[in-house]
Image: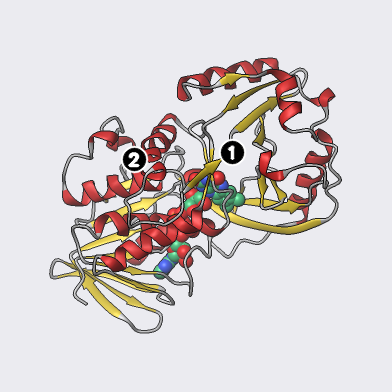
Amino acid sequence: MNPDIIIAGGGIGGAAAGYFLSRHFRVLLLEQESMAGYHASGRSASIFTANYGSDIVSALARSSRAFLDAPPPDFVSTPLLGPLGVVTVCGPGQEDLFADALRLARARVPDLQHAGAAFACTRLPFLRPERIADSFFEPGAADIDTDALHQGYLRGIAAAGGRVAFDARIVAVGRSGGAWRVRTAKGMQAEAPLFVNAAGPWADMVAGLAGLAPLGLEPRRRTAILVALPAAVEARALPMVTLADDTLYARPSGGALMASPADATPSPPCDAQPEEYDVAVAIDRLSQVTTLKPERVLRKWAGLRTFHPDGNPVLGEDAGAPGFFWLAGQGGAGIKTSPALGMLLASAVRREAPPPILAGIDGAALAPRR
Ligand SMILES: Cc1cc2nc3c(=O)[nH]c(=O)nc-3n(C[C@H](O)[C@H](O)[C@H](O)COP(=O)(O)OP(=O)(O)OC[C@H]3O[C@@H](n4cnc5c(N)ncnc54)[C@H](O)[C@@H]3O)c2cc1C
């Protein structure tokens, strides 16, 4: 094929970028692994909440909601969002921290409910009542069918005449004659006037292949475990619960409970694996706030969440390299913000104003060399 644009990375970021770009350009997406979602995008908690991250991240999530609620008819055959809700709880002595968290959440979630301790303990019957002093509830927080979303994006690229290639690790990127030329480890060569760096934790390394300075992106490892629930607890009726001090969150997953100690350990880009210490911390914290006996871990995993030093995603053309665009640094919000980021990137590449739903997003705050 003779692509207009080459995308490095087939995680949710590269897939969403490819989906929205493929309406206007012939897209070639190159992914180093043999499947989509092998790294962060297949290891997330799959939660949609408007009450997460910086104000820009929250705005990107809210702007993504319309797409997630009602994607185009040919995108998926099942809903992308399922009911969940998030209860944020604090313990005795954490009233000040809770008041700050509540103020911020109210500014972002119009239907937020200040719900109290009893509400939390009723909805999550395994919480230890003596450890819960107060709670607030975000009823619209939802479970994302991440796999369906990811596959929908990739199918859309192919349907528009683009190509997604797996086992295609880019090892060389250069520019000559107004084109970006890439070579993969297996010898595939391609060139296009436009290039998108959506390589997740490897984004700074891919930029380095093109001779560009790194942005200082930092991958941070986050651990998750899956533990069994008592037979009397109906998993499907549970909301997610998160501690206001950001030391633990848990959500129903299948018939079990996924929990994370909310760790954020700096890591080089790699196939992240869970450390026993972080698994033990998750079990310990779960034991402290719940009556669950989580010694038997059904599954454990880790993934890398990649951050720009200021915590906002990176999106736009590199000031020093015409036609080289970035979509990286989505941190812990890359699934729920993927529609907005994909649309924004397509607007940036086309040098057009973003669609009205994204008009409030300050593009300068996302610029790579900001
Ligand atoms: C435990 C955990 C919980 C999370 N929970 C949530 C959540 O609830 N909600 C939410 O919205 N987000 C969540 N996230 C964050 C979310 O998963 C990430 O923000 C998102 O997946 C980032 O997508 P990405 O495409 O940038 O990265 P990745 O999924 O890492 O994709 C980057 C891709 O680039 C490929 N690549 C790299 N270098 C090359 C190369 N040279 N050539 C070709 N391909 C290359 C890699 O193989 C990889 O597939 C969570 C993350 C973790 C780890």
- Residue labelled with disc 2: 366
| Label 1, residues with CA under 10 Å away: few <14, some 14-19, many ≥20 | many
Instruction: In this rendered view, identify the residue nearer to me: 34 or 189.
Output: 34
- Residue labelled with disc 1: 84
Residue 101, given in percent of the width and then of the height, sits at 58, 22
Secondary structure under badge 1?
loop
Instruction: In this rendered view, identify the residue nearer to me: 102 or 172.
Output: 102
Q: Is residue 198 left or right of residue 23?
A: right
Q: Quadrant of residue 77?
A: bottom left
Type of amino acid at the residue the image marks with label 2: Leu
Residue 180, given in percent of the width and then of the height, sits at 22, 68
* Quadrant location of the C terminus in the rendered image: top left
Res. 331 visible in picture: no
Which residue is at a point 46% across and 21% down the rendered structure image?
Answer: 110
Numbered mark located on residue 142 in the image: none
Which residue is at a point 46% across and 24% down the rendered structure image?
Answer: 108
Type of amino acid at the residue the image marks with label 1: Leu
Of pointers 2 and 1, the one earlier in the residue sequence = 1
Scheme of image coloration: secondary structure
The yes-or-no answer for disc 2 within 8 Å of ligand 1 is no
* Residue positioned most to the bottom: 187
Tell me if residue 125 comes above or below residue 281 in the rendering: above
Q: Quadrant of residue 179?
A: bottom left
Instruction: Report the mark closest to the observer, 2 or 1.
Output: 1
Which residue is at a point 31% across and 33% down the rendered structure image?
Answer: 361
Residue 29, given in percent of the width and then of the height, sits at 33, 67
Q: Is residue 66 left or right of residue 141?
A: left
* Quadrant location of the N terminus in the rendered image: bottom left
Q: Is residue 41 left or right of residue 97?
A: left
Secondary structure under badge 2?
loop
